């Protein structure tokens, strides 16, 4: 009886040990797969709707831009892309929302030049390292416009009058210590002039003040002023760019007349810095494709946002934001 039982018990123990060993192997394999996914694999992304956070209200330039890109991303990524408007505080609310959101690629920030300005002024607690850039799509063109039958024959005349009467010429812009004013301050530093900057809540109010003769010049992009430019009511005195603008070849370009100012509104996309790099790369590739699609190109041209190439990849956009933060910090110090 013992001769039968003992071999049977030994055989049972061997089978049991093999079973346990196999289970351990399976668990190890499963653990390796989980680690790979947790380290940032983009496999299966996106599996649910993506939100693009816009720091301004519906119907404005930032909102329209985000929606034009979202339309293309939906097709490219085969996913629903929703626009969420968190307006207020010059984009600070949107920046805060993205900083607190899960770093999974499903919350994307449509940011503008307001962010490096807020960062330079200390208005936001979220440093640049909080985010990771996906890419910059637009680098809008800023210009100075005046009444065609107004007091300035050209940009040289404006500069001459500004030097003769410092602080007398009134120039309108949207927002105080915002992007428009910082462009004006860069112009002043480059030309050795002093203008009287008047802040307005919106572009419509600012343009109305110019047309009514309450101010002398406005800082504005070509698109919103296009109707007045085409009918001849306004004259574009100078465009802040490094090459002639399509359709405005006769307009003086800042760099060509010795004014080293080319700053324009930056529009791009960012995510939380801890977002898996594979997802960031996938979004970067999708964004680069989106900006080249016919419908988006049509949107750009209709709004005169195509006047210069704005594309910067993830790495280059981060470097640009670092430079802008430093530049804006220096200018803001001078305003205090």
Image: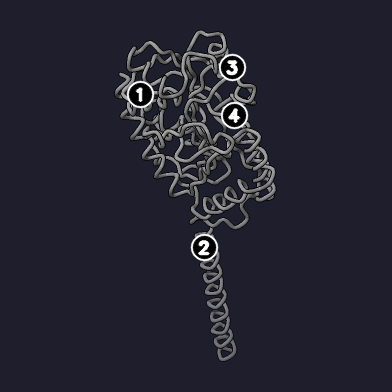
| Secondary structure state at the residue bearing disc 1 | helix
* Residue at mark 1 to residue at mark 2: CA–CA distance: 62 Å
Please tell me how many numbered marks the rendered image carries: 4
| Secondary structure state at the residue bearing disc 2 | helix
Closer to the chain start, of discs 4 and 2, is 2
Closer to the chain start, of discs 1 and 3, is 1
- The residue wearing badge 1 is 188
- Mark 1, mark 2: which one is toward the viewer? 1
Rendered residue at 54%/46% (across/down): 104
- Mark 3, mark 2: which one is toward the viewer? 3
Q: Quadrant of the C terminus?
A: top left
Closer to the chain start, of discs 3 and 2, is 2
- Residue at the outermost bottom position: 3
Residue 289 visible here: yes
Give how far across and how far down residue 45 sits, in percent. 61, 52
Choose between 239 and 104: the one closer to the eye: 239
Closer to the chain start, of discs 1 and 4, is 1
Q: Which mark is residue 31?
A: 2
- The residue wearing badge 4 is 223
| Secondary structure state at the residue bearing disc 4 | helix
Rendered residue at 41%/19% (across/down): 158
Residue 11, compared with residue 181, is above or below; it is below
Residue 101 visible here: no
Asked if the residue at tag 4 contacts the one at tag 1, i.e. Cβ–Cβ closer than 8 Å, the answer is no
Closer to the chain start, of discs 4 and 3, is 3
- Mark 1, mark 3: which one is toward the viewer? 1
* Residue at mark 4 to residue at mark 2: CA–CA distance: 55 Å
Badge 1 density bin: few <14, some 14–19, many ≥20, Cα 10 Å: some
* Residue at mark 1 to residue at mark 3: CA–CA distance: 24 Å
Q: Which mark is residue 204?
A: 3
Closer to the chain start, of discs 1 and 2, is 2
Residue 178, compared with residue 282, is above or below; it is above
């Amino acid at each position: 009886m013992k001769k039968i039982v003992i071999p049977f018990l030994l055989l049972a123990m061997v089978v049991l040990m093999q079973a346990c060993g196999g289970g351990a192997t399976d668990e190890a394999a499963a653990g390796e797969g989980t680690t790979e996914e947790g380290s940032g694999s983009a496999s299966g992304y996106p599996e649910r709707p993506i939100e693009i956070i816009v720091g301004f209200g519906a119907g404005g330039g930032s909102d329209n831009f985000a929606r034009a890109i979202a339309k293309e991303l939906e097709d490219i990524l085969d996913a629903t892309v929703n626009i969420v408007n968190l307006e207020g505080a010059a984009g600070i609310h949107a920046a805060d929302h993205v900083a607190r959101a899960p770093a999974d690629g499903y919350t994307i920030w449509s940011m503008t030049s307001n962010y490096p300005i807020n960062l330079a002024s200390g208005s936001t607690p979220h440093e640049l390292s909080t985010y990771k850039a996906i890419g910059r799509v637009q680098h809008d063109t800023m210009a100075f416009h005046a009444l065609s039958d107004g007091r300035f024959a050209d940009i040289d005349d404006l500069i001459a009058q500004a030097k003769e009467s410092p602080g007398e010429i009134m120039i309108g812009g949207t927002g105080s210590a915002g992007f428009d004013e910082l462009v004006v301050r860069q112009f002043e530093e480059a030309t050795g002039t002093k203008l009287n900057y008047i802040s307005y809540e919106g572009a419509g109010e600012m343009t109305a003040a110019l047309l009514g003769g309450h101010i002398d010049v406005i800082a504005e992009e070509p698109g919103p002023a296009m109707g007045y430019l085409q009918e001849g009511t306004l004259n574009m005195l100078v465009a802040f760019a490094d090459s002639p603008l399509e359709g405005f070849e006769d307009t003086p370009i800042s760099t060509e007349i010795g004014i080293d100012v080319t700053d324009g509104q930056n529009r791009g996309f960012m995510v939380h810095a801890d977002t898996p790099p594979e997802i960031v790369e996938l979004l970067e590739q999708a964004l680069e494709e989106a900006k080249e699609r016919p419908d988006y190109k049509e949107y750009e041209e209709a709004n005169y946002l195509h006047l210069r190439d704005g594309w910067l990849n993830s790495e280059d956009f981060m470097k640009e934001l670092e430079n802008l933060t430093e530049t804006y910090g220096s200018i803001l110090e001078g305003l205090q």
